[in-house]
Image (tube, grey):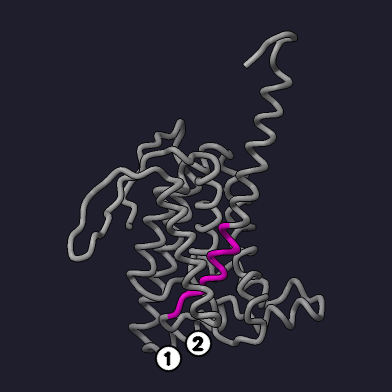
Amino acid sequence: MIPLRDRNPTRRTAIVTFGLIGACFAVFALELSITATGGDGALETFFQRWGAVPADITAALSTGNLAGQATVGIFASMFLHGGWLHLLGNMLFLWIFGNNVEDRLGSLPYLLFYLVGGIAAALTQVVIDPRSDVPLVGASGAIAAALGAYIVLFPGARILSLVFLGFFYQLLEVPAIIVLGFWFGLQLLSGFAAFDAETAQGGVAFFAHIGGFVFGLAVGLLLRIVRAGTRRRGRPAGSMG
Protein backbone atom coordinates (compact mmCIF):
# COMPACT_ATOMS: atom_id res chain seq x y z
CA MET A 1 0.00 0.00 0.00
CA ILE A 2 1.66 3.21 -1.22
CA PRO A 3 0.04 6.56 -0.31
CA LEU A 4 -0.04 9.10 -3.15
CA ARG A 5 -1.94 12.05 -1.69
CA ASP A 6 -4.48 12.89 0.99
CA ARG A 7 -7.81 14.72 0.95
CA ASN A 8 -7.01 16.87 3.94
CA PRO A 9 -6.69 20.55 2.98
CA THR A 10 -4.50 22.89 4.99
CA ARG A 11 -5.30 26.44 6.08
CA ARG A 12 -1.85 27.87 5.42
CA THR A 13 1.27 27.22 3.38
CA ALA A 14 3.49 24.53 4.89
CA ILE A 15 6.63 26.65 4.93
CA VAL A 16 8.69 24.35 7.15
CA THR A 17 7.69 21.22 5.23
CA PHE A 18 8.68 22.89 1.96
CA GLY A 19 11.95 24.00 3.56
CA LEU A 20 12.77 20.51 4.86
CA ILE A 21 12.10 18.97 1.46
CA GLY A 22 14.26 21.61 -0.22
CA ALA A 23 17.08 21.05 2.29
CA CYS A 24 17.02 17.28 1.71
CA PHE A 25 17.24 17.75 -2.06
CA ALA A 26 20.06 20.28 -1.66
CA VAL A 27 22.06 17.89 0.54
CA PHE A 28 21.40 15.06 -1.89
CA ALA A 29 22.82 17.22 -4.69
CA LEU A 30 25.96 17.56 -2.54
CA GLU A 31 26.06 13.77 -2.16
CA LEU A 32 25.84 13.34 -5.94
CA SER A 33 28.72 15.78 -6.32
CA ILE A 34 30.82 13.86 -3.78
CA THR A 35 30.12 10.58 -5.57
CA ALA A 36 30.94 12.11 -8.96
CA THR A 37 34.31 13.43 -7.80
CA GLY A 38 35.40 10.77 -5.30
CA GLY A 39 33.30 7.68 -5.99
CA ASP A 40 31.30 5.54 -3.58
CA GLY A 41 34.18 5.42 -1.10
CA ALA A 42 34.09 9.19 -0.67
CA LEU A 43 30.33 9.08 -0.07
CA GLU A 44 30.73 6.34 2.55
CA THR A 45 33.33 8.50 4.31
CA PHE A 46 30.93 11.44 4.17
CA PHE A 47 28.16 9.32 5.71
CA GLN A 48 30.53 8.06 8.40
CA ARG A 49 31.37 11.62 9.36
CA TRP A 50 27.91 13.19 9.15
CA GLY A 51 25.56 10.25 9.78
CA ALA A 52 24.27 9.17 13.17
CA VAL A 53 26.71 6.46 14.27
CA PRO A 54 25.26 4.45 17.20
CA ALA A 55 28.67 3.57 18.67
CA ASP A 56 29.73 7.23 18.66
CA ILE A 57 26.43 8.33 20.18
CA THR A 58 26.75 5.68 22.90
CA ALA A 59 30.25 6.88 23.72
CA ALA A 60 29.12 10.52 23.78
CA LEU A 61 26.24 9.74 26.12
CA SER A 62 28.47 7.72 28.46
CA THR A 63 31.01 10.55 28.74
CA GLY A 64 28.49 13.40 28.78
CA ASN A 65 29.94 14.89 25.59
CA LEU A 66 26.63 16.13 24.19
CA ALA A 67 28.06 18.90 22.02
CA GLY A 68 30.45 16.86 19.89
CA GLN A 69 30.42 15.33 16.44
CA ALA A 70 28.11 12.49 17.47
CA THR A 71 25.36 14.96 18.36
CA VAL A 72 25.92 16.92 15.16
CA GLY A 73 25.58 13.64 13.29
CA ILE A 74 22.11 13.02 14.73
CA PHE A 75 20.85 16.28 13.25
CA ALA A 76 22.82 16.07 9.99
CA SER A 77 21.66 12.49 9.35
CA MET A 78 18.05 13.71 8.97
CA PHE A 79 19.04 15.38 5.70
CA LEU A 80 21.18 12.57 4.23
CA HIS A 81 19.84 9.84 1.92
CA GLY A 82 21.33 6.70 0.45
CA GLY A 83 19.87 6.99 -3.06
CA TRP A 84 17.11 8.38 -5.23
CA LEU A 85 14.51 5.85 -4.08
CA HIS A 86 15.32 6.54 -0.44
CA LEU A 87 15.04 10.29 -0.97
CA LEU A 88 11.90 10.34 -3.12
CA GLY A 89 10.04 7.87 -0.90
CA ASN A 90 10.79 9.90 2.21
CA MET A 91 9.88 13.20 0.57
CA LEU A 92 6.56 11.79 -0.67
CA PHE A 93 5.61 10.77 2.88
CA LEU A 94 6.84 14.08 4.29
CA TRP A 95 4.74 16.08 1.84
CA ILE A 96 1.57 14.02 2.21
CA PHE A 97 1.54 13.89 6.01
CA GLY A 98 3.90 16.60 7.23
CA ASN A 99 2.00 19.59 5.87
CA ASN A 100 -1.15 18.80 7.86
CA VAL A 101 0.78 18.24 11.09
CA GLU A 102 2.56 21.55 10.51
CA ASP A 103 -0.82 23.19 9.88
CA ARG A 104 -2.12 21.90 13.22
CA LEU A 105 1.01 22.67 15.28
CA GLY A 106 2.18 25.88 13.64
CA SER A 107 5.44 26.25 11.73
CA LEU A 108 8.00 26.77 14.51
CA PRO A 109 6.50 24.20 16.92
CA TYR A 110 6.37 21.74 14.01
CA LEU A 111 10.04 22.28 13.23
CA LEU A 112 10.93 21.58 16.88
CA PHE A 113 8.63 18.53 16.85
CA TYR A 114 10.27 17.24 13.66
CA LEU A 115 13.81 17.59 14.97
CA VAL A 116 13.03 16.09 18.37
CA GLY A 117 11.20 13.25 16.62
CA GLY A 118 14.34 12.58 14.59
CA ILE A 119 16.41 12.53 17.78
CA ALA A 120 13.97 10.10 19.43
CA ALA A 121 14.14 7.88 16.36
CA ALA A 122 17.95 7.79 16.29
CA LEU A 123 18.19 7.12 20.04
CA THR A 124 15.74 4.22 19.72
CA GLN A 125 18.02 2.60 17.16
CA VAL A 126 21.02 3.28 19.41
CA VAL A 127 19.30 1.47 22.29
CA ILE A 128 18.70 -1.54 20.04
CA ASP A 129 22.25 -1.68 18.65
CA PRO A 130 24.52 0.59 20.73
CA ARG A 131 27.83 -0.76 19.39
CA SER A 132 27.08 -0.45 15.68
CA ASP A 133 29.53 1.64 13.70
CA VAL A 134 27.25 1.80 10.64
CA PRO A 135 25.91 5.35 10.16
CA LEU A 136 22.17 5.92 10.15
CA VAL A 137 21.07 8.25 7.37
CA GLY A 138 17.68 9.47 6.23
CA ALA A 139 14.75 11.62 7.27
CA SER A 140 12.50 8.61 7.83
CA GLY A 141 12.76 8.65 11.64
CA ALA A 142 11.64 12.28 11.85
CA ILE A 143 8.99 11.66 9.20
CA ALA A 144 7.75 8.66 11.20
CA ALA A 145 7.09 11.10 14.04
CA ALA A 146 4.88 13.12 11.68
CA LEU A 147 3.05 9.91 10.71
CA GLY A 148 2.44 9.08 14.36
CA ALA A 149 0.97 12.51 15.03
CA TYR A 150 -1.11 12.38 11.84
CA ILE A 151 -2.77 9.07 12.70
CA VAL A 152 -3.96 10.57 16.02
CA LEU A 153 -4.93 14.02 14.73
CA PHE A 154 -6.51 12.96 11.42
CA PRO A 155 -7.44 9.27 11.69
CA GLY A 156 -10.34 9.53 9.24
CA ALA A 157 -8.56 11.54 6.55
CA ARG A 158 -8.86 9.85 3.16
CA ILE A 159 -5.56 8.81 1.63
CA LEU A 160 -5.45 7.98 -2.08
CA SER A 161 -3.27 4.87 -2.12
CA LEU A 162 -1.86 2.41 -4.62
CA VAL A 163 -2.99 -0.93 -3.24
CA PHE A 164 -1.34 -4.09 -4.58
CA LEU A 165 -3.47 -7.23 -4.83
CA GLY A 166 -1.08 -9.96 -5.92
CA PHE A 167 -0.06 -9.13 -9.49
CA PHE A 168 -2.72 -6.42 -9.75
CA TYR A 169 -3.05 -2.98 -8.25
CA GLN A 170 -5.83 -0.51 -7.67
CA LEU A 171 -6.18 3.11 -6.61
CA LEU A 172 -8.31 3.35 -3.49
CA GLU A 173 -9.10 6.03 -0.93
CA VAL A 174 -8.27 4.52 2.44
CA PRO A 175 -8.63 6.10 5.92
CA ALA A 176 -5.35 7.32 7.38
CA ILE A 177 -5.73 5.04 10.40
CA ILE A 178 -5.58 2.01 8.08
CA VAL A 179 -2.77 3.29 5.83
CA LEU A 180 -0.53 4.37 8.70
CA GLY A 181 -1.56 1.48 10.93
CA PHE A 182 -0.50 -0.89 8.16
CA TRP A 183 2.78 1.00 7.75
CA PHE A 184 3.54 0.83 11.49
CA GLY A 185 2.64 -2.85 11.66
CA LEU A 186 5.03 -3.52 8.81
CA GLN A 187 7.81 -1.70 10.67
CA LEU A 188 7.19 -3.82 13.78
CA LEU A 189 7.19 -7.08 11.84
CA SER A 190 10.27 -6.15 9.81
CA GLY A 191 12.13 -4.84 12.84
CA PHE A 192 11.69 -7.98 14.91
CA ALA A 193 12.32 -10.21 11.88
CA ALA A 194 15.67 -8.52 11.24
CA PHE A 195 16.60 -7.38 14.73
CA ASP A 196 19.90 -5.78 13.77
CA ALA A 197 18.77 -4.22 10.49
CA GLU A 198 20.19 -0.75 9.87
CA THR A 199 22.55 1.10 7.58
CA ALA A 200 23.45 3.39 4.83
CA GLN A 201 24.35 0.36 2.74
CA GLY A 202 20.87 -0.81 1.81
CA GLY A 203 19.41 -1.88 5.15
CA VAL A 204 16.63 -0.14 7.04
CA ALA A 205 16.71 1.09 10.63
CA PHE A 206 13.24 -0.18 11.46
CA PHE A 207 13.51 0.60 15.16
CA ALA A 208 14.29 4.23 14.34
CA HIS A 209 10.98 4.31 12.46
CA ILE A 210 9.23 2.70 15.42
CA GLY A 211 10.75 5.14 17.90
CA GLY A 212 9.85 8.16 15.79
CA PHE A 213 6.30 6.94 15.26
CA VAL A 214 5.72 6.29 18.97
CA PHE A 215 7.05 9.77 19.78
CA GLY A 216 4.62 11.26 17.25
CA LEU A 217 1.76 9.22 18.71
CA ALA A 218 2.52 10.55 22.18
CA VAL A 219 2.62 14.16 21.00
CA GLY A 220 -0.57 13.72 18.99
CA LEU A 221 -2.40 12.21 21.96
CA LEU A 222 -1.17 15.02 24.22
CA LEU A 223 -2.47 17.60 21.74
CA ARG A 224 -5.87 15.92 21.61
CA ILE A 225 -6.10 15.81 25.41
CA VAL A 226 -5.13 19.48 25.74
CA ARG A 227 -7.57 20.48 23.00
CA ALA A 228 -10.41 18.50 24.59
CA GLY A 229 -9.70 20.08 27.96
CA THR A 230 -9.67 23.56 26.40
CA ARG A 231 -13.02 22.93 24.75
CA ARG A 232 -14.57 21.72 28.02
CA ARG A 233 -13.36 24.79 29.89
CA GLY A 234 -14.73 27.01 27.15
CA ARG A 235 -18.30 25.68 27.41
CA PRO A 236 -20.86 27.83 29.22
CA ALA A 237 -22.30 26.48 32.48
CA GLY A 238 -25.06 23.95 31.95
CA SER A 239 -24.09 23.14 28.35
CA MET A 240 -24.16 19.53 27.26
CA GLY A 241 -22.71 17.50 24.38
Q: Residue furthest front?
A: 166
Residue denoted by label 2: 45
Near mark 1 (Cα within 10 A), the count class, few <14, some 14-19 or many ≥20, is few
Image quarter in which the C terminus is found: top right
Horizontal side of 11 relative to 113 (left or right) equals left
Q: Establish if 59 lies above or below 125.
A: below
Classify residue 31 as left or right of residue 169: right
Q: Which residues are magenta?
A: 203-213
Numbered tag placed on residue 76 in the rendering: none
Residue at left offset 42%, top offset 45%: 176
* Main SS class of the magenta portion in the image: helix
Kindly identify which residue carries mark 1.
41
Give left or right: position of 218 versus 199: right
Residue at position x 23%, y 49% from top? 171
* Left or right: 207 in relation to 12: right
- Residue type, numbered disc 1: Gly
User: Given contact means CB atoms under 8 Å apart, are the residues at marks 2 and 1 in contact?
Assistant: yes
In this figure, what is the number of numbered marks? 2
Q: Residue at x 22, y 64 (%)?
A: 166
Q: Residues within 10 Å of mark 2 (few under 14, many from 20)?
A: few
Q: CA distance from mark 2 to mark 1?
A: 6 Å
- Name which residue type carries label 2: Thr
